[in-house]
């Protein structure tokens, strides 16, 4: 019989403080950045200062004579063309961090400076063809051919519209701004093995990629000889999936220096070179009836992924299933390449769709909440039969319920007013709403091993990493539930690739992969334990069960304290390995262990000062479903954190490239703004617990709709649309000035 | 730094002397931190001060009640001295220019950005880092509240916040939540744990910071 989640849950779904909280909050936890190895030296990367250049010469002779110099690793060569300011040229290592910086400064690189393009709007006017050749036709174009899509009845939909509204909307490139920079410590052992302590979202993937590099480039045999350790990591948000350039460079330096090397990116490099969220701009037209029914959606969008070529928007229209015609143009610029960032593409798509929807609602004079209720996609009738726990099967019912809860918690009925009617004084009140969706399915495969010892200790081992989601505690909660223990009784070891397989922590896949694997492992270990002790208890295996702290023999009615029961194990060590993956989750027999496809609704309330342009967000209500909740405390803090990241998108964040030099002018934390505690609204999180669906990931969805909800709240306050994030005073005042004309 | 705090046992230059000597405060501070060798040269042009460095000099710091010694170049910040030379890594290096607060430590009870202070300036002062807030498994009430309310995610900013909050409550055990928040205005969290931090602040203020 397939394993199920327990019907009556004693630990799962309760508030469990994260097990590693004391170590983290008191600085005892050792992150990769904190690893200091005996004899360790420091690595620094020398970077190209030009947005587009060819290397004419590299002279390291002076650098190699500098005090403390230990090793040099060339990343680029003479003749190499570099495509953005900050691109890696070479790496050096020296005995101290100070000396390493001196050595880097002593490297002389001569460049032939080439034409570049760093602004989307400039590229649209004049394609300077300044990028690396792409595809079979070796195109250097800034503009990629547009991608278009049109639904069958779009033309009819637009024809049937009684009202059409067109608006422009946009979001700039922003930075992941991980507080622990990308980087690692690399150390070669006497056995030829490589150990790295890497700040990564993919422990196994990082080890594998490093092994591949040395196998390929140095013809070494690194099979089973690369160990990646990530016990703690300080933020990734989608930007830390492999060793990266600095990972390879660090391991190469360590090989050459014959010493452990620490190479962490400095803040400017972190922001400029270690990924970013692509920009998205666009023109959206919504057509519909005066009763609020939207009949057609048209979007022409563009944005830059930097030097890459990836799309910069997600599905459009977003959440809703309007008849649509969409076009997207990728603009390649001489900026660092984009990387996945917390629900890639979704915040952008949400902003286009939900802001345009509010502008349409204003045009027909309707409450935008009512327009949403009228247009949310209905439950899919076929899915209700074939896959009743799926998102399509329940989306209509779910969003309706979530909108109602969000309206009630935010006081929407009393607080919403027609746009521009936010009060008579200079400070205007506004309220706005937005919807989002995400997957959060299992991926993998992920292996979890549970071992029970005769002293009663329980060890859980898995290679996965904790990005800040309290992953250790998830594993402990599930195992404690099955073994009748408390989470603190469980020892959890994570973040080492020899512990088995695990996927990278992307797509909110970690919890839905790890929790079922932990369940299966714990059940197997428990059953193996029963098999060993049944004989010694003169009991039948099938009569044994576990309640809180005790093993119970149903037949005799005898109860055995956990430790006493474990003492009967003698030298045996019951061990269960559980494996979970997307493929396992998709099997009908496994329905209910993990799922994906969530909905969420957020309502933001703002005060806008029309004299200064300053926006203060007063309150945000976040209603979110995520299947079976494992740790309510951490789940709610994950949602609140997502909201805060979305608020930062809305009010503060923008990476600014300088047209004249091609460089990022704010690769820091004083001019790249993030909100502090004084900038934060009251955040009300409401989780919809749907245990029948199984575990679903929650990391990404709550950050998606916040900026659109805030944008709509500002529109509600002012009656004019501030079209682009961040909603800084200058943009607010410009929109007011434009609206007054 | 007061004139009288100049160390008697080793010739040195206080920041005030140094700034007076060069007469160009902004440039001087920048060069003091960034350019090796420059500080020694320029300081020589001052009146009666004796330069140290640019090579390593002996550094003795009192960290969490323990005297720690090492050798650092005078340009090394307190943050780098703690992390790179003394293996005290609770203070984190993030922005490295006095913006984010992840490197916050207490110096004689006051919270400071350890990336903005030279290690040599901290000699003779009592330095307290987040590591002092756990004693044999017993947590100080501030980190305990962070744990109980889950006011941390990735945790990289957390020791800085915890030290800043401990300092606010030490200075004023009757601080209101608004006052505590003001004391945290110099710290930045990327994961967005401020809502849970407010829960922790509320609990701590009710208990008088204990």
Image (spheres, rainbow, N blue to C red):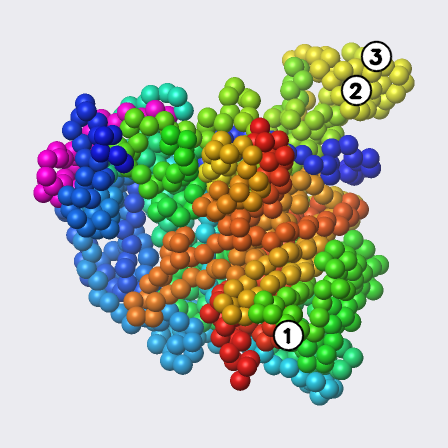
Q: Would you say A520 lies left or right of A167 here?
A: right
Placement of A566 over or under A268, stated as above or below: above
Q: Which residues are magenta?
A: B38-63
Mark 3 lies on residue: A538
Q: Which sits in the foreground, A241 or A481?
A: A481
Res. A333 image quadrant: bottom left
Return the chain for callout 3.
Answer: A
Q: Nearer the viewer, mark 1 or mark 2?
A: 1
Does label 2 lie on the same chain as label 1? yes
The one of A101 and A428 positioned closer to us in this rendering: A428
Circle nearer the N terminus (2, 3): 3
Relative to B153, residue A339 above or below: below
Question: Position of A580 compared to A724: left or right?
Answer: right
Residue A656 left/right relative to A439:
left
Q: Secondary structure at mark 2?
A: strand
Q: Which mark is residue A420?
A: 1
Verify whether residue B155 appears in magenta: no
Same chain assignment for discs 3 and 1: yes
Q: Which residue is mark 2?
A: A551
> Residue at horizontal 46%, vertical 28%?
B131
- Tell me where residue A293 appears, x and y as whole percent: 76, 77
């Amino acid at each position: 019989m397939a394993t199920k989640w327990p019907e009556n849950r004693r630990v799962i779904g309760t508030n469990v403080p994260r097990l590693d909280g004391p170590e983290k909050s008191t600085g005892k936890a050792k992150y990769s950045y904190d690893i200091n190895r005996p004899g360790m030296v420091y690595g620094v990367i020398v970077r190209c200062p030009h947005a587009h250049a060819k290397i004419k010469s590299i002279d390291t002779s002076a650098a190699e004579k500098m005090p403390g110099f230990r090793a040099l690793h060339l990343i680029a060569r003479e003749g190499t063309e570099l495509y953005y300011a900050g691109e890696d040229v070479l790496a050096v290592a020296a005995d101290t961090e100070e000396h390493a910086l001196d050595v880097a400064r002593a490297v002389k690189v001569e460049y032939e400076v080439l034409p570049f393009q760093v602004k989307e709007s400039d590229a649209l006017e004049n394609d300077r063809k300044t990028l690396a050749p792409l595809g079979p036709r070796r195109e250097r174009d800034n503009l990629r051919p547009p991608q278009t899509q049109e639904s069958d009845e779009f033309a009819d939909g637009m024809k049937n519209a009684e009202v059409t509204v067109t608006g422009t909307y946009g979001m700039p490139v922003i930075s992941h701004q991980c507080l622990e920079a990308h980087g690692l410590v690399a150390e070669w052992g006497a056995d030829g093995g490589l150990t790295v302590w890497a700040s990564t979202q993919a422990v196994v993937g990082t080890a594998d990629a490093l092994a591949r590099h040395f196998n390929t480039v140095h013809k070494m045999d690194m099979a089973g000889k690369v160990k990646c350790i990530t016990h703690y990591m300080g933020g990734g948000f989608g930007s830390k999936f492999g060793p990266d350039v600095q990972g390879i460079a660090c391991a190469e330096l360590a090989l050459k220096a014959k010493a452990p090397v620490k190479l962490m990116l400095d803040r400017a490099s972190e922001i400029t070179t270690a990924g970013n969220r692509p920009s998205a701009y666009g023109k959206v037209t919504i057509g519909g009836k005066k009763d609020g029914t939207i009949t057609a959606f048209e979007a022409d969008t563009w944005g830059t992924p930097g030097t890459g070529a990836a799309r910069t928007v997600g599905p459009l229209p977003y959440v809703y299933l309007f008849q649509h015609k969409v076009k997207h143009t990728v603009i390649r610029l001489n900026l660092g390449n984009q990387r996945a960032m917390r629900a890639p593409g979704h915040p952008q798509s949400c902003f286009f769709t939900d802001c345009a929807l509010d502008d349409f609602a204003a045009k027909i004079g309707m409450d935008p909440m009512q327009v949403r209720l009228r247009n949310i996609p209905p439950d899919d009738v076929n899915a209700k039969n074939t896959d009743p726990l799926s998102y399509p099967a329940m989306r209509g019912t779910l969003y309706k319920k979530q909108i109602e809860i969000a309206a009630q918690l935010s006081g929407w009925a009393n607080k919403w007013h027609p746009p521009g009617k936010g009060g008579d004084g200079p400070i205007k009140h506004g309220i706005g709403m937005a919807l989002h969706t995400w997957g959060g399915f299992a991926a993998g495969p992920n292996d979890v091993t549970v071992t029970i010892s005769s002293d009663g200790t329980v060890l859980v081992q898995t290679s996965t990493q904790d990005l800040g989601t309290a992953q250790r505690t998830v594993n402990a909660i599930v195992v404690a539930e099955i073994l009748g223990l408390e989470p603190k009784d469980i020892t959890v070891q994570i973040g080492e690739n020899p512990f088995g397989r695990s996927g990278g922590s992307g797509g909110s896949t970690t919890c839905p992969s790890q929790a079922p694997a932990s369940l299966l492992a714990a059940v197997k270990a428990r059953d193996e334990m029963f098999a060993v002790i049944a004989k010694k208890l003169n009991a039948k295996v099938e009569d044994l069960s576990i309640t809180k702290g005790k093993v119970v023999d149903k037949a005799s009615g005898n109860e055995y304290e956990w430790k006493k029961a474990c003492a009967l194990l003698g030298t045996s060590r019951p061990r269960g390995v559980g494996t979970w993956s997307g493929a396992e989750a998709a099997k009908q027999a496994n329905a209910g262990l993990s799922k994906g496809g969530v909905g969420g609704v957020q309502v933001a309330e703002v005060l806008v000062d029309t004299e200064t342009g300053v926006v203060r967000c007063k309150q945000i209500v976040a209603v979110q479903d995520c299947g079976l909740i494992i740790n309510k405390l951490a789940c709610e803090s994950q949602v609140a954190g997502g909201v805060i990241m979305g608020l930062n998108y809305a009010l503060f964040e923008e990476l600014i490239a300088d047209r004249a030099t091609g460089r990022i002018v704010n690769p820091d934390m004083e001019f790249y703004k993030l909100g502090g505690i004084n900038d934060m609204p009251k955040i009300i999180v409401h989780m919809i617990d749907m245990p029948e669906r199984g575990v679903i990931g929650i990391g990404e969805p709550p950050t998606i709709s916040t900026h659109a909800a805030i944008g709509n709240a500002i529109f509600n306050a002012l009656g004019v649309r501030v079209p682009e994030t961040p909603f800084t005073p200058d943009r607010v005042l410009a929109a007011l000035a434009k609206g007054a004309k | 730094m007061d004139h009288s705090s100049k160390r008697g046992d080793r010739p040195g230059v206080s920041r005030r002397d140094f700034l007076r000597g060069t007469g160009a405060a902004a440039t001087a501070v920048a060069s003091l931190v960034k350019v090796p060798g420059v500080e020694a040269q320029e300081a020589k042009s001052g009146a009666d001060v004796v330069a140290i460095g640019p090579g390593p000099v002996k550094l003795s710091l009192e960290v969490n009640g323990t005297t720690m010694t090492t050798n650092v170049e005078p340009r090394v910040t307190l943050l780098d001295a703690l992390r790179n030379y003394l293996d005290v890594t609770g203070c984190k290096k993030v922005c490295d220019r006095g913006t984010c607060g992840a490197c916050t430590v207490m110096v004689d009870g006051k919270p400071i950005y350890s990336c903005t202070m030279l290690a040599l300036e901290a000699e003779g002062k009592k330095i307290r880092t987040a590591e002092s807030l756990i004693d044999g498994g017993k947590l100080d009430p501030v980190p305990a509240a962070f744990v109980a309310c889950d006011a941390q995610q990735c945790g990289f900013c957390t020791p800085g916040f915890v030290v800043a909050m401990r300092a606010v409550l030490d200075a004023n055990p009757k601080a209101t939540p608004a006052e505590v928040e003001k004391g945290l205005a110099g710290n930045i969290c990327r994961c967005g744990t401020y809502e849970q931090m407010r829960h922790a602040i509320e609990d701590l203020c009710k208990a008088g910071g204990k």
